[in-house]
């Protein structure tokens, strides 16, 4: 089945170029040119991934990302200005799974998309008989990649789910930020360790009653992060 991608950018030449290249890889591509249109299409469509520019008319990429996260956990890759670290951090804070800096090589875009898709498929296919992971009040449906706490569904991004699944499957094992970056994002990922910190912070805000005094995801100061139910 062809992957369905939503490409959002107000520069039509960029949208046209990305769309053409993705279609060459047999992906189905839909497009939007402002933030409001992006949210509407994300709500109506069933996309496998969204490429979302930061600088958009009507609704910024950050606001569009945040709005999409209210109803969907579809993987989102933000397209940010070159060298603007604040855009990268804000994109992750607002719920993006990854970011690519402009100007970019289309081969990098396709590689990032395929990496996220492979990781999701691997997690879905590799669960075997262990489709449910229960830790205290936390229940992870590994097959459908859904999280429940006290039977209330918690909406996680693809990366947040990957991080939590890895930690929860290996309780009390401490992972450094570099470990998590390599295992979740891949060894070739060009981002830095702050990416991990942002995702851990967002994860705690979603699953912990008191993020500053976590029950599940703990910090071993100077070493890394670990899970304890």
Image (spheres, helix red, strand yellow):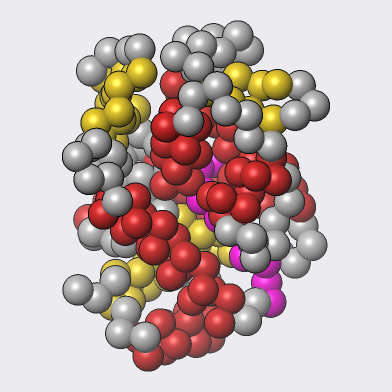
User: Splitting the image into 4 quarters, where does residue 28 fall?
Assistant: bottom left
Which residue is rendered at x = 39% and y = 63% of the image? Answer: 118
Q: Is residue 131 above or below residue 183?
A: above
Percent coordinates x, y for residue 130 in the rendering: 24, 36
Q: Is residue 80 left or right of residue 222?
A: left
| Highlighted magenta segment, given as a residue range | 93-103
Percent coordinates x, y for residue 12 in the rendering: 50, 81
Examine the structure image and report whether residue 47 is included in the region drawn in magenta. Answer: no
Q: Quadrant of the N terminus?
A: bottom left
Percent coordinates x, y for residue 19 in the rendering: 41, 82
User: Splitting the image into 4 quarters, where does residue 108 fall?
Assistant: bottom right
Q: Is residue 110 above or below residue 191?
A: below
Percent coordinates x, y for residue 123 in the rendering: 34, 50
* Residue 193 shows in the view: yes
Residue closest to the eye, 181 or 169: 169
Which residue is rendered at x = 28% and y = 39% of the image? Answer: 142
Residue closest to the eye, 60 or 118: 118
Which residue is rendered at x = 60% and y = 19% of the image? Answer: 218
* Residue 91 shows in the view: no
């Amino acid at each position: 089945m062809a992957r369905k991608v939503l490409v959002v950018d107000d520069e039509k030449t960029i949208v046209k170029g990305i769309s053409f290249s993705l279609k060459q890889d047999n992906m189905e591509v839909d497009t939007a040119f402002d933030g409001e249109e992006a949210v509407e299409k994300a709500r109506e469509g069933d996309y496998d991934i969204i490429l979302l520019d930061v600088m958009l008319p009507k609704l910024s990429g950050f606001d569009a990302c945040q709005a999409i996260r209210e109803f969907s956990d579809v993987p989102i890759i933000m397209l940010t200005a070159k060298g603007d670290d604040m855009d990268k951090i804000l994109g992750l804070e607002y719920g993006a799974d990854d970011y690519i800096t402009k100007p970019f090589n289309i081969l990098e875009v396709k590689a990032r998309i395929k990496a996220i898709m492979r990781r999701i498929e691997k997690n879905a296919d590799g669960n075997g008989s262990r489709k449910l992971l229960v830790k205290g009040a936390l229940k992870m449906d590994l097959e459908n990649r859904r999280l429940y706490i006290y039977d209330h569904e918690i909406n996680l991004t693809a990366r947040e789910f990957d991080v939590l699944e890895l930690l929860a499957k290996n309780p009390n094992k401490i992972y450094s930020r570099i470990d998590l970056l390599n295992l979740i994002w891949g060894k070739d990922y060009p981002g830095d360790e702050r990416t991990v910190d942002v995702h851990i912070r967002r994860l705690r805000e979603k699953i912990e009653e008191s993020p500053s005094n976590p029950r599940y995801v703990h910090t071993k100061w100077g070493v890394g992060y670990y899970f304890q139910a």
